[in-house]
Each structure stands twice: as C-alpha cells, then as structure tokens.
Image (cartoon, helix red, strand yellow):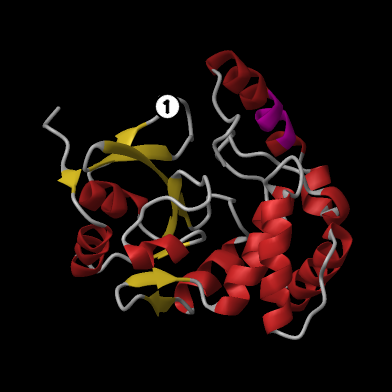
Amino acid sequence: MSKQKVWTSIDEIFTALNAAECNYIVMRNFECFEQGQVFVNGHDDIDLLCDDIIKIKKVLDVRHRFHFPMVNSYYILFNNLIVHVDIRFIVDGYYDKKWQENMLENKTLFHDRIFVPDFENYFYSLIYHAICQKNYLSDEYLDKLSNMASKIGLSCSTESELLKELLKYMRKNEYKASITKDPAIILNFKALEDIEISGNIFWLARRKIFDLLKHIKRIGDKYV
C-alpha cells in the first residue's frame, strides 16, 4: 500500500474535495473548522454524507479503522494526528434516502468552502442523530438543540419536545426511520415506532447477527 497522504489544514482537505467536484456535506460539529480546528467539544471525527463514497475515499486517501462488513469508519492523517472520518452515503440507511437527497440538494457553504446542511436539515437531522443514534440524549446535545430551536421560533427544552418536533417534520416530509447497513451504529428509535422497522424481519435478524459480531470485535462503542 502506498504511503498515506498527510493533510496539513482544514482548508486543504475541503479545497481538495471541492476541486474534485465531490457532492458532500459535513453533517455536524463543523463549527470549529472556522478556526482551523478539527475537533469540537470532544467530538473527534468528521462526519460526511455524500452520493459517491468511492470518490470521497480516493480524494481523502482514507484507511479503514475496522475491517468489518459494512462499517464505514475510516481515518486520515492530519499533521501529527489520526483523525477519524465517518462516510455516509445515499441508500446506506443512515437517514431516510429522501432525506439524504434533500440534505445534499439543499447544502450550503460554511466558511466559504465547506459544504454543510442548511439550517433546517441540520436541526432536524441532529435531533434524529442525538436521540435515535445514541443510547441517550446528552446534556451537550440538548443544550445545542434547544438553542437551535429558539432560532426558528420553537421552544424545545426537553427530549420529548424535541421528539415531537422531529416526528412532525418527518411526517410532513414523508421521511421514515431507517435501519442502517452499518452495524456499528446504535439504533434507538423510541417513540418513532416505524412499521417498516418493526416488521422487517430480514433486517432485524441481520442486525442481531452483526450486533453479536461487533461486540466480539469490540467496535461500535463510541463510533456513531
């Protein structure tokens, strides 16, 4: 294997993605990039959504964190650091396919060169991530989401209030909760109660097998 590229700045990373005309967004925790930092509040990875994972992997020159079926967690070299990069793509089940397409279609520029979700998609996809892809809603995410809610005239100071707004948004746009192909991701659908999820015996059985294997391999504890 050839020597892995070493990236020297955030600007270099996203200039390369843009020059290659990659269709991507950084899904969350991108606020620190404005100061040239790669980590924010303990979040030690870059979370991407794209429509061509092969192209993104080639441009970034990533390496696998885990050699495990369907786990899309990688790393890049950033100066003297190893930075984790999780790459999601349309139809991988990380979000509803229609929602993924909408996020990419309505992406906006952050700091003039980094594509991120528009505010509406950022807010609601972050609720979904913070509640449905975590074991519990952290105080950090609750504070952030409450502040974001106030910017669009909503009062959401509890998990139940956030879930209520998420459900309204998903029903309005005909988005569904979805089982991820990546078995390392937590599934915690709670009040979403999606019929396709509970009734899909094939996916649930497959998921249970992968859940067992991932614990043997010790992946997925912090990786979401």
Q: Residue furthest bottom?
A: 153
Residue drawn 46% across and 54% down? 89
Q: In the rendered view, would you say 206 is above or below 51?
A: above
Q: Position of residue 153 (x, y in %)?
A: 76, 86
Residue 175 visible at all: no
Magenta residue span: 204-208
What's the residue type where badge 1 is placed? Phe
Q: Nearer the viewer, residue 2 or 149?
A: 149
Q: Residue at x 82, y 62 (%)?
A: 163
The residue that label 1 is drawn on is 66
Q: Chief secondary structure of the magenta span?
A: helix
In the rendered image, residue 148, in percent from the top left (x then y), is placed at 66, 73
Q: Is residue 170 shown left or right of residue 17? A: right
Instruction: Kindly tell me whether residue 118 is visible in this rendering.
Output: yes
User: Which x, y percent locates residue 85?
Assistant: 39, 45
> Position of 83 compared to 183: left or right?
left
Q: Residues within 10 Å of mark 1 (few under 14, many from 20)?
A: some
Query: SS at mark 1?
Result: loop
Tally the marks.
1
Judge left or right: residue 17 versus residue 138: left
Task: State whether residue 94 is above or below residue 32.
Answer: above
Report the residue at 57% width, 77% height from top.
Answer: 119
Residue 134 position by quadrant: top right
User: What is the x, y in percent for residue 108?
Assistant: 43, 79
